[in-house]
Amino acid sequence: MGFQKPTGTQDLLPGVVERWQFIEEKARDLCRRFNYREIRTPIFEQTSLFERGVGETTDIVEKEMYTFLDKGERSMTLRPEGTAGVVRSYVENKLYGEPDVSKLYYIGPMFRYERPQAGRQRQFHQFGIEAIGAIDPAIDAEVISLGYELCKELGLHGVTVEVNSVGNPQSRADYREKLLAFLTPMKDSLCKDCQSRMERNPMRVLDCKVDQDKFTGAPSILDSLDEESLTHFEQVKSYLTDMNVDYTINHRLVRGLDYYTLTAFEYKAQGIGAIDTVGGGGRYNKLVAEVGGPDQPGVGLAIGLERIHLILENQNIEVQGYRPLDVYLVGLGEAADKEITKQLFKLRKAGISAERDYLGRKMKAQLKSADRMQARYTAILGDDELARGEIAVKLMETGEQRTVKLEDLAAELK
Ligand code: ATP
Ligand code: MG
């Protein structure tokens, strides 16, 4: 009996992994252009960080966390998302003491105990950014536009951003009353989670996957926004318009926890049926303080990479895959074989991707191998060439063949 990977996880094999690298490189390059710098935090943290930083009435904390006791009887959790760890690190490392806004990004695995299906796994990957230390609506717009641009540059079709404002805590107190008045008459028809959340945190109810359809007539939080919240929202939208970001307003898009404030948004793309959300984010002006730091505002986004792959696939978008080998070296005879090994290393040092045979195969089998690796050139070294200090180089595409000096091989191939 062999072993199998855990349910809800994936092996990313060569052939597929290159597409992952391509998307990651795109994300990193965008971050460079937008001046976000990478942060790498642990894959597990104290459980209480997520209880605080994600929120006790969320699906994540209520049902989805991979929590375990370590050998010291401490409760630890595999990170279900990236923001809590980044904010913890921001506080612990006193990044708030730096003069500029902390603009950070991460790419890595996240863990949630969910029922696996297309685009939903137990180990999945997120790309995310956090901008901590500024309340300027221009930075909300910057964060939104970065995620939008990633989708665009990857070539996804039908990308839109849904935006909303959940206001500041004062606006929300007003909305809470109106929402409760709307929900109370239908309470008995709602799912168990909704019923319990109604008491603890009514805004979370709007997020329910089961009862979604019942809330089309819910009051809009936008009608409860105070002056300050409204102005911020108007400015974010105006920047998005300036940047040609395609957005719509969805007043039922909520992040119902007290530390989420003002801007909330989600990216949608065409063509993954029921699962059309690529990612989302929002402003969290109370979160840094919630996890023990100073009162610093933040805004961020997280994009699911499995979702991006799924959409690319569904929309038949080709992304850069395996990069063909530059040259495959064949040595005929013992002395030539030895020389090949030396040349191989020289080429690789010079930045050329190069390969040889390690299985003692005949020349014909070696050339087939070169074909499979899509080698641009093959270079064949026999005893005669070796004696003259030369090697025969063939451009595979045209069959054109040339003899070059061994010491010039790297330069010639370049
Ligand atoms: P959903 O409504 O799909 O469960 P969510 O609200 O739980 O999403 P967030 O916590 O906002 O999602 O995470 C941001 C993004 O991370 C999602 O939009 C999605 O692309 C991705 N994501 C979340 N959970 C998973 C998962 N289990 N498998 C794969 N991707 C995921
Ligand atoms: Mg979820």
Image: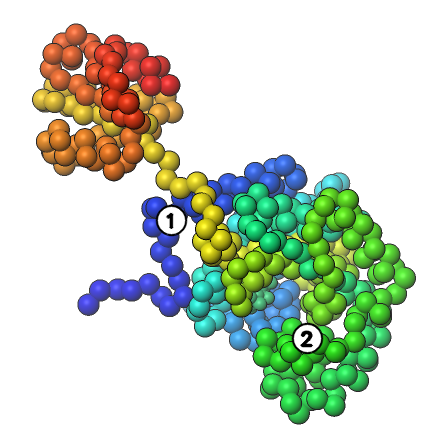
Q: Residue at x 90, y 62 (%)?
A: 227
Residue 356's image quarter? top left
Q: Position of residue 345 (x, y in %)?
A: 28, 24
Report whether 225 appears left or right of 23.
right
| Mark 2: few/some/many CA within 10 Å (<14, 14-19, 20+) | many
In the displayed structure, 130 sits above or below 72; it is above
CB atoms of marks 2 and 1 within 8 Å: no
* Disc 2: which residue: 206
Q: Which mark is residue 16?
A: 1
On the rendered image, what quadrant is the N terminus found in? bottom left
Locate ligand 2 by image quadrant.
bottom right
Residue that extends furthest to the bottom in the rendered view of this protein: 188
In depth, the one of 137 and 310 nearer the eye is: 310
First-in-chain label (2 vs 1): 1
| Mark 1: few/some/many CA within 10 Å (<14, 14-19, 20+) | few
Q: Position of residue 337 (x, y in %)?
A: 15, 23
Q: Amino acid at mark 2?
A: Leu
Could you tell me if residue 87 is visible in this image? no
In the displayed structure, 179 sits above or below 329; it is below
Could you tell me if residue 191 is visible in this image? yes
Q: Position of residue 247 (x, y in %)?
A: 71, 55
On the rendered image, what quadrant is the C terminus found in? top left
Q: Which mark is residue 150?
A: none
In the displayed structure, 391 sits above or below 116; it is above
Q: Residue at x 61, y 59 (%)?
A: 268
Q: Secondary structure at mark 1?
A: loop
In the displayed structure, 7 sits above or below 374; it is below
Spatial separation of the CA atoms under disc 2 and disc 1: 37 Å
Report whether 223 appears left or right of 263.
right
Report whether 387 appears left or right of 237.
left
